[in-house]
Image (tube, rainbow, N blue to C red):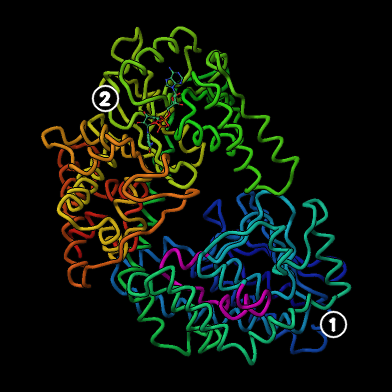
């Protein structure tokens, strides 16, 4: 019996069973991890299964006994997170990266190819519950059908590009065949995630099923073997005779978004699809160009840095609210301006009830309007939008203070205002509530100094725009209690942000390194170089946004105030003072260094600098940022070079392909 042969393999990571009607149920269950990922061992074991199936199906007697096959996972964390990135990183660190990663790519490619041939002979189904990423999606694509459960956790992605690598196990070949080249490249070149409903809509999933009927849906597919949804005529043309046109159109749009010398992976993916239909074994150059690049190694490093920050959140706190673990239900935000509004909206999106307080009714009305707009953009479902809006409570008199488990002050950057707010909070809040200030530059000790109990005030510093920036600096004051500090770190993780512990010092880490950089950019404006040329120089160098545009986005008033605290000994740039005098505060007033219309920058002056001038300017402008990062590590403001690199990448968007300022400083 074939099932006995499969069982006799004694696999560690795959469980096999056959039901009464002849369907083989193949469970992916990585034995040593709570999350499924495809380590080389898991893929090797899958290869053994594929060999036995392949041989068995060659024998008539066996073929009749297998009606179909379902691959699934029971892990609550999801279906499969893809290739084992930690394994990749440890290979990269050992130095034999090119050779071994090439073998990993080709082994997976051949096994999944062979498996797809099995899917042509018997109906195979991937039953996807929870996330299905990278190699996990490539495995699903090699099945004949994909069943996705209709729930919030199920999502699909080929995120390899974000790690500087490419999907080498058939994703580049099979995804365009399933959903057409434009949709497929949109997913693969951005690494974006789609939920199960979107997956069903675009034809990636064949069936969208309620979780409790998902197994029945698989059995029905195997029994009925319906034809797969056909690609549209246009998509067929772009996969066939018009493939070259599709290739050029996608490449043109890609070139407008990223530079190949910084990020070779998306270009490699596109070329591999066009030239070899996704087969990495046929193209030696792709390997050297993409996997052999510094970018790939640096992006893998950035992945690890992210994991390191996530790992920091595994801290314990003794603070209890009648449960063994402190459960956060209610968050109260004070200040409904740029930051407070977005912090409140973000926390609601993470499932919390949030009250938001401001002295201005207009500001509160603005938050509700913005929330309604943001929720509407994020969710089509009106009921979901309404449910989220119900969890955002405008609160003019601050009655949320008494109920809140976490209170975040995000009011005007003024010491007296903040002191007064905290003295009110101290009188009215629960004794176990975590008290946070989002201050950018004021020392936490100064804010909490006059309180009876300053030990639970922690700096919890979000970045603008909150909905996009993943980092939150956790600022430890001299007086703060370790339990409340841990509480703050754990809270940050619960709202799905990356916590970076820093010491209380002017500008903490991120603003302290950013300010000298922004100021040197503005002094360059004082010296007659245009904002357009400066921003272009830094974007060509690899920054996601130019420094002058960043000043306009953050606000010129904030930059003046924060700059004064951080670089006390130096006078502010003349242009910054001048524009502030005119009340040109940047994007929020539609005028700063640039003119802004409907939130979009209006470009004025033509670029004047030559390529060499631009390159030299960029290297000069970034120097102060790098030097300051090195200095702050030496001063112990942040615990290590790695954490400093992580903070500057996730807090400023510092060119990730360079691996962080200190890494760049040391390795180029
Ligand atoms: P903002 O001027 O946009 O908003 C401040 C809000 O606080 C206003 O709505 C104001 O009415 C309200 N306010 C003032 N006094 C109050 C009081 N006593 N009670 C309740 N509300 C009060 O400012 P912002 O840019 O949102 O900055 C808020 C805080 O976040 C500051 O400490 C700032 O340093 C910090 N921060 C700002 C940024 C940024 O990019 N703007 C980034 C990180 C941190």
Q: Which residue is mark 2?
A: 443
Local crowd at mark 1 within 10 Å, few (<14), some, or many (≥20)? Answer: few
Q: Which residues are magenta?
A: 159-182
Quadrant for residue 514, please give it: top left
Label 1 sits on a secondary structure element that is helix
Q: Of tags 2 and 1, which is closer to the observer?
A: 2
Disc 1 Cβ-to-ligand 1 distance below 8 Å: no
Label 2 sits on a secondary structure element that is loop
Q: Which residue is mark 1?
A: 64
Local crowd at mark 2 within 10 Å, few (<14), some, or many (≥20)? Answer: many
Q: Earlier in the sequence, mark 2 or mark 1?
A: 1
Instruction: Residue at 22%, 72% (x, y): give it.
Output: 611
Quadrant for residue 486, please give it: top left
- Relative to residue 478, is residue 274 depicted above or below? below
Q: What quarter of the picture does the N terminus occupy?
A: bottom right
Q: State the residue in front, 579 or 43.
A: 579
Q: Residue extending furthest front?
A: 582
Residue 484 image point, x, y percent: 40, 23
- Relative to residue 185, is residue 571 depicted above or below? above
Relative to residue 608, is residue 631 drawn left or right?
left
Instruction: Residue at 25%, 35% (x, y): give it.
Output: 560
């Amino acid at each position: 019996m074939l099932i006995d042969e499969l069982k006799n393999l004694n696999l560690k990571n795959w469980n096999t069973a056959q039901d009464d009607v002849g369907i083989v149920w193949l469970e992916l269950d990585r034995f040593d991890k709570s999350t499924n990922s495809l380590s080389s061992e898991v893929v090797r074991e899958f290869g053994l299964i594929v060999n036995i199936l392949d041989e068995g199906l060659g024998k008539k007697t066996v073929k009749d006994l297998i009606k179909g096959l379902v691959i699934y996972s029971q892990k609550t964390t999801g279906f499969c997170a893809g290739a084992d990135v930690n394994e990749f990183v440890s290979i990269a660190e050992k130095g034999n990266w090119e050779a071994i990663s090439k073998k990993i790519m080709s082994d997976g490619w051949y096994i999944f190819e062979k498996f797809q041939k099995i899917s042509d002979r018997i109906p195979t189904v991937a039953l996807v519950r929870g996330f299905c990423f990278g190699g996990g999606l490539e495995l699903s694509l090699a099945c004949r059908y994909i069943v996705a459960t209709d729930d919030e956790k199920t999502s699909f992605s080929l995120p390899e590009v974000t790690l500087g690598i490419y999907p080498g196990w058939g994703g580049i070949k099979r995804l365009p065949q399933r959903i057409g080249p434009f949709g497929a490249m949109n997913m693969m070149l951005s690494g974006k995630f789609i939920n199960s409903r979107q997956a069903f809509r675009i034809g990636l999933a064949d069936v969208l099923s309620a979780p409790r009927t998902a197994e029945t849906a698989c059995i029905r597919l195997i029994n009925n073997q319906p034809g797969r949804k056909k690609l549209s005529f246009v998509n067929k043309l772009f996969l066939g005779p018009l493939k070259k046109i599709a290739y050029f159109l996608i490449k043109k749009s890609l070139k407008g978004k990223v530079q190949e010398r910084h990020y070779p992976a998306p270009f490699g993916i596109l070329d591999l699809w066009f030239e070899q239909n996704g087969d990495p074994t046929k193209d030696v150059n792709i390997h050297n160009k993409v996997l052999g690049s510094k970018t790939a190694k640096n992006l893998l490093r950035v992945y690890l840095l992210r994991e390191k920050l996530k790992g920091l959140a595994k801290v314990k706190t003794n603070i209890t609210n009648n449960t063994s673990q402190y459960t956060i239900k209610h968050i109260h935000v004070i200040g409904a301006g740029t930051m407070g509004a977005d912090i409140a909206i973000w926390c609601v999106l993470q499932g919390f009830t949030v009250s938001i307080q401001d002295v201005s009714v207009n500001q509160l009305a603005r938050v509700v309007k913005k929330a309604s707009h943001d929720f509407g953009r994020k969710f089509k479902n009106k009921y979901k939008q309404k449910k989220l809006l119900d969890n955002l409570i405008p609160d003019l008199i601050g009655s949320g203070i008494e109920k809140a488990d976490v209170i975040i002050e995000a009011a005007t950057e003024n010491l007296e205002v903040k002191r007064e707010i905290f003295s009110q909070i101290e009188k009215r809040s629960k004794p176990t509530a975590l008290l946070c200030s989002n201050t950018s530059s004021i020392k936490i000790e100064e804010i909490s100094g006059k309180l009876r109990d300053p030990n639970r005030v922690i700096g919890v510093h979000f970045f603008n725009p909150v909905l996009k920036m993943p980092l939150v600096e956790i600022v430890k004051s001299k007086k703060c209690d370790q339990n409340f500090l841990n509480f703050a770190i754990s809270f940050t993780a619960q709202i799905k942000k990356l916590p970076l512990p820093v010491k209380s010092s002017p500008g903490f880490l991120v603003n302290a390194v950013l300010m000298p950089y922004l100021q040197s950019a503005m002094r360059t404006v004082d010296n007659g170089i245009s904002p357009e040329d400066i921003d272009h120089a830094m974007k060509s160098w690899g920054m996601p946004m130019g420094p002058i545009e960043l000043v306009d986005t953050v606000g010129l008033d904030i930059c003046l105030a924060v700059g004064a605290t951080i670089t006390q000994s130096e006078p502010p740039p003349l242009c910054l003072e001048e524009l502030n005098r005119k009340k040109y505060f940047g994007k929020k007033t539609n005028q700063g260094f640039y003119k802004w219309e409907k939130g979009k920058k209006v470009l004025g002056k033509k670029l004047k600098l030559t390529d060499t001038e631009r390159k030299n300017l960029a290297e000069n402008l970034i120097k102060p940022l790098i030097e300051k990062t090195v200095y702050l590590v030496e001063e112990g403001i942040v615990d290590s070079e790695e954490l400093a690199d992580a903070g500057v990448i996730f807090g400023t968007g510092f060119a990730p392909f360079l691996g962080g300022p200190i890494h760049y400083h040391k390795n180029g």
